Amino acid sequence: MQSKLKMPLTGIIPPLVTPLLDNDTLDVEGLERLVEHTIAGGVHGVFILGTTGEFASLSYKLRRELIRKTCGLVNGRVPVLVGITDSAFAESVNLAAFAADCGADAVVLAPPFYFATAQPELLEYLEKLVLQLPLPLFLYNMPIHTKVIISPETVYTAAQIPGIIGLKDSSSNLVYLKQVQHLMREKKDFAFFVGPEEFMAEFVLTGGHGGVNGGANLYPKLYVDLYNAAVKKDFIEINKLQQKVMQISASIYNVGHYGSSYLKGLKCALSLCGICSDFMAEPFHRFKSPERRIIEEALNGIEF
Amino acid sequence: MQSKLKMPLTGIIPPLVTPLLDNDTLDVEGLERLVEHTIAGGVHGVFILGTTGEFASLSYKLRRELIRKTCGLVNGRVPVLVGITDSAFAESVNLAAFAADCGADAVVLAPPFYFATAQPELLEYLEKLVLQLPLPLFLYNMPIHTKVIISPETVYTAAQIPGIIGLKDSSSNLVYLKQVQHLMREKKDFAFFVGPEEFMAEFVLTGGHGGVNGGANLYPKLYVDLYNAAVKKDFIEINKLQQKVMQISASIYNVGHYGSSYLKGLKCALSLCGICSDFMAEPFHRFKSPERRIIEEALNGIEF
Amino acid sequence: MQSKLKMPLTGIIPPLVTPLLDNDTLDVEGLERLVEHTIAGGVHGVFILGTTGEFASLSYKLRRELIRKTCGLVNGRVPVLVGITDSAFAESVNLAAFAADCGADAVVLAPPFYFATAQPELLEYLEKLVLQLPLPLFLYNMPIHTKVIISPETVYTAAQIPGIIGLKDSSSNLVYLKQVQHLMREKKDFAFFVGPEEFMAEFVLTGGHGGVNGGANLYPKLYVDLYNAAVKKDFIEINKLQQKVMQISASIYNVGHYGSSYLKGLKCALSLCGICSDFMAEPFHRFKSPERRIIEEALNGIEF
Amino acid sequence: MQSKLKMPLTGIIPPLVTPLLDNDTLDVEGLERLVEHTIAGGVHGVFILGTTGEFASLSYKLRRELIRKTCGLVNGRVPVLVGITDSAFAESVNLAAFAADCGADAVVLAPPFYFATAQPELLEYLEKLVLQLPLPLFLYNMPIHTKVIISPETVYTAAQIPGIIGLKDSSSNLVYLKQVQHLMREKKDFAFFVGPEEFMAEFVLTGGHGGVNGGANLYPKLYVDLYNAAVKKDFIEINKLQQKVMQISASIYNVGHYGSSYLKGLKCALSLCGICSDFMAEPFHRFKSPERRIIEEALNGIEF
């Protein structure tokens, strides 16, 4: 297929949270405010149905509604990337077709996450899948949830397949990042993004294309400014903004006991800022009053 | 709800493979032969859409067709258990409702498998889910795929919820098995099954209720006979039959390089025996000729 | 070498705790009481410098003193097995030579535990090591601490090397146990023991040779009686004694928050029974008063 | 104690390989050449008995000889750091005392690596240990081998203890690095080094103090030049040198099948360059001819 996207894609592409009223009902007004808030902040695209979007916890009906609504709200102002990760090949294909019909610009896919694949199985899976996708594909390395690392060699081989245009890495593994960058050094149009916002600036400084950073739901301009400072190698500005990013990470994402602290804290903060509901799809549950007060204080402590 | 099931359920309940013609097409004739073959072998129930049934790789359309067809083919001769494990709460509920409409007897559920839950989150999830299920529920402990252990304490607490009637454990962890048995010792109607067939007999000897053993797709009578021998504590018979079970495990499930050897070997053997197609849903692929020949020789080496 | 040991060894062989007065001083009187207590309880051997003996936390000076003292105290009444697990090959060899000089009967070794070995590396390591050992060797599978599983195939191959006479498994993995039993079925003089006491009886019922059970430090006769009941397939007696074993497991080993609960609880109980000090070598620390009171109540709740 | 070291330490400190003639004999001439080679390359210190030095595989006799010889050879030209990591507290203390007597400048310690400690246990262990050390201490985060992460909060608390002067991280986890940097931002004299050389430059660019990079055994000047370029934020030079570092990583460290490829490749290359023997202590074994030829070609392909 012919991609409408700039190649490679660059910049800040927030993985949008999915605003919910209950377990199977979209918070449509919240979604509208979220889309306007992030676009106003200067983001270079939006990514729905990622991990931050709780894709795996949402029914297909709701996933489809979210795709349709988001594409409509964005209305071509920035590219829309749609997560199609699924344990079932056929459902990934179905979702990609729907996303294309709604006008999305690309799809994003992590490996199947029930059965763990070996690398040759994963590559064969990707080769077959791409043939059935009507949109260009970003690979999504997320081993903590999928149990599978998309190895640097698999990224390299997959990137030769027409239609595979980039990688988002959420492994936080620096050796992995460097190995992928080294292997892909000749393929200039292959986009490489990182998820964890704590090192987006560092990554961009040394050749990365951008960040898919959850905090950009909340403070889109901060992450866009930091990205721009990194592109310009403006270390004074980087240091100033990086402090705020680390403060967010150390406070808002760090309340509560479980692995879900990041997601709960982010949705709670968005709710406190009046952007959208903090309802979370099962198996997670929004923060109750005590945690909510801690998040509120954390928000007050971040100066802009 | 009122269960039609004997409480506790006992015996051999094969986790049926899902016969496929291609990635999204059921091998209906293969399914019919498989159902007849296992019922003729004396199994005490069948379980569809488990790990052996590749549930996670199947589209919802195909899962529904499989439920409807299986319930029709079995036609009340033995209980039908239906896997409703899903990363999305709403889809588990949808599938359970469909299963009830088709006449299934119980549903089986492992924890959500993208986001790993902490035990309190898992318990809250189960409490909410059970309220929306029209059929009794078996818990399914499968940590290698879900990344979550249903702790003995969570099993104990969940078992107090009306509607949760049993546990299938596939962790192979003997301390876990013993801890659950000890905690549940007063709750005589709670069924406790194991997945791995290598120790089904041992488990039944010491109080377990039965096995959800993949090999019973192929040799249902062998596993039923072994179960009966264990119930009777007939050690001579146990030793004789256990040798065959170990021979199957060491040969048919042990070809090829990856974690998927068991599934591929089982489907290949069923195909060689003329029961059903060996097609596997993505991300797995059936054995090619060299491995197929090894499985053929293994089958010839098992004497009955 | 020619082993003085019965082949295969059978029965209950407690992995003795190491009684300590401080981080580098043996509680010699406690050791004497512990040795007499366990031998009086009918144990079939003792094993020092295992995981329960905190071997890895002890200086070499103290390990040597413990070996010498224990061999002297036991004085040939039962076999003495000595742990020689070490990350350094040369130190394992040194310790084995010392143990032989002191009159020990066998040595026990888990894989090197800093660098994780692949199976061919492990096998080569074992082949070289055995040539330098003056005593017969038990393999010790303890993957949670060593990060390495001694695979069933490696056990099988290693068992062909003269001088390797048995395996103690602490993986709790039932499929592993059954696979090893199946592979070793023709080698009748190879001893196979399990660590976790929760399934010792079940293991012996189905062909296992015995248990290296920590609880036998405290209640040696209980475990010996349970072993004997399992040998006789006396299910009434097994069920009665197994309840006590599970009660110990669920209470004494289950206080406190970390993975070290078992060790801390066991040493605390031994101290409360007047057998030896509960001092623990760094990096662990004995229970303080609140936990000690819980253990005391647990001890009072176990009826004999 | 009063440290003779510059605070914070900065620069390139190679983790020296341990040249061996056989499993328990030092290659003294190789060690001399290695020390002279690295100092001639401009390194800012040397670190012996780290993971690259195979510390865990060496007898205590050999560890002591290595400490004594290295301190003598270096003779005060650069600081000597000595690894004292051990599963036994008493042996770490013994080794630190010996290192101080030989004139070493600091010691380096990873958590005990048989028993995994929880963070409060680890902190208590460190607090007790530091009191008995005659030299300042670097913490060493190496979770792949020790199974324990020294959490950012534990680093922060430990760094308040007089005598703990730095951290070497080998986790490769970028979020971890950023969290530690953020927590330690006010403690300017606390040194923070990374192990994996693939991102040393990036780390130094954004505030890190240096690298403990294995490749600096082989090409000390390359890593020193890259460090200096990073300090000067000379991106043209960084990019040029980083290519060579990645080429080394992708070729020399990437031969063979197991986790030990890095160590085997590095020692093989040092042997090919005539610096020292490639003998490896058990449980590892040096490369044989085919792998050696691949390393030779890789060396020839690196242009300087």
Image (cartoon, coloured by chain):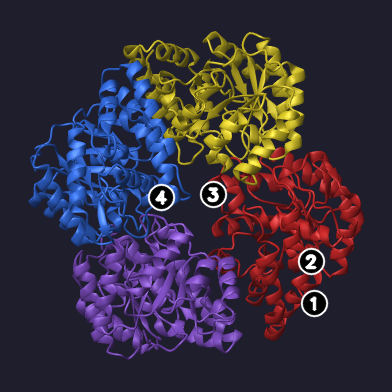
Chain colours: A blue, B purple, C red, D yellow
Label 1 or label 3, whichever comes before in sequence order: 3
Q: Is residue D86 visible?
A: no
Give the residue number, with chain letter if any, for mark 2: C6
Q: Amino acid at mark 3?
A: Gln
In the image, is residue B259 above or below residue B73? above
Q: Nearer the viewer, residue B294 or B40?
A: B40
Type of amino acid under label 1: Phe
Name the residue that disc number 1 marks. Answer: C304
Instruction: Indicate left or right for A223 with B178 as reference.
Output: left
The quarter of the displayed image where residue D51 is located = top right
Q: Quadrant of residue A88?
A: bottom left
* Mark-to-mark CA distance, 4 and 1: 46 Å
Residue visible at 86% across and 45% down? C65
Q: Secondary structure at mark 2?
A: loop
Is there CB contact under 8 Å for labels 4 and 2? Answer: no
Labels 1, 3: front one: 1
| Quadrant housing the N terminus of chain C | bottom right
Which numbered disc flags the more N-terminal residue, 2 or 1? 2
Q: Nearer the viewer, mark 4 or mark 2?
A: 4
User: Can you identify the residue that label 4 sits on?
Assistant: A260
Identify which amino acid the numbered label 4 is placed on.
Answer: Ser
Asked whether B27 or C36 is in front, the reply is C36
Pinpoint residue B144: horizontal percent, then vertical percent: 44, 59
Dividing the picture into quadrants, the one containing residue B105 is bottom left
Q: Which residue is mark 3?
A: C119
Q: Secondary structure at mark 4?
A: loop
Query: Helix, strand or loop at disc 3?
Result: helix
Both marks 1 and 3 on one chain: yes
